[in-house]
Image: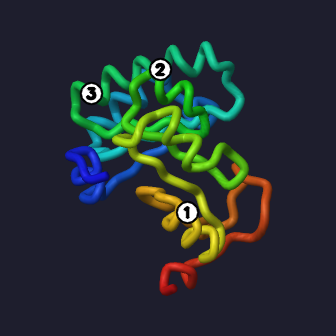
Amino acid sequence: MENDLLKIFSDVKLYVIISSDLIKKPFEEVLHDVIEGGADVIQLREKMMSDAEFLTIAHKARKATAQSKTIFIVNDRAEIARQADADGLHIGQSDIDINTARKILGYNKIIGVSTHHISQARKAQQSGANYVGVGPVFPTATKGYEPSVGWIIYNR
């Protein structure tokens, strides 16, 4: 499954996650600032937003990221990613599986998976994930689960 998008993704240096409940400026302004700041990838993460609202801002994000050639990833919601023509989807351990995501999005899209243990990262890789996110490295108030993994996990 080698295509231009995946080649570009392999050179990513700055991956930014935007969540409207954590920003203090209007969404469009934050999106513009992140793109101008040099983000290679923008993930739109909206846990509490309705599908209709999410789709509206996903279309705005798609338009802006397409113009800037920034990779656009949607968090969790495969149908939103498909409808907004996102470059990919990021899923967690309790979301849909990679095979289902590929059936919804197609096989030329990027699929990323959040992991918290080496075994989860290996399973995601074996299942066809294009990348894994490992963490959290530090304790966080945005997630309510097991302790942070710390830096030691990156040595494995």
- Residue corresponding to mark 3: 66
Q: Is residue 18 visible?
A: no
> Residue 55: where, in percent of width, then height?
53, 18
Q: Amino acid at mark 1?
A: Ala
Residue 101 occupies quadrant: top right
Where disc 3 sits, the SS reads helix
126 w.r.t. 104: above or below: below
33 w.r.t. 5: above or below: above
- Residue corresponding to mark 2: 83
- Residue corresponding to mark 1: 124
Q: Could you give the CA–CA distance between mark 3 and mark 1, rounded to whole angstroms? A: 28 Å
Q: Could you give the CA–CA distance between mark 2 and mark 3, rounded to whole angstroms? A: 15 Å
Q: Tag 2 or tag 1, which sits nearer the N-term?
A: 2
Where disc 2 sits, the SS reads helix
> Residue 75: where, in percent of width, then height?
55, 39
Mark 2 vs 3: CB contact within 8 A: no
Residue 10 occupies quadrant: bottom left
Q: Could you give the CA–CA distance between mark 1 and mark 2, rounded to whole angstroms? A: 24 Å
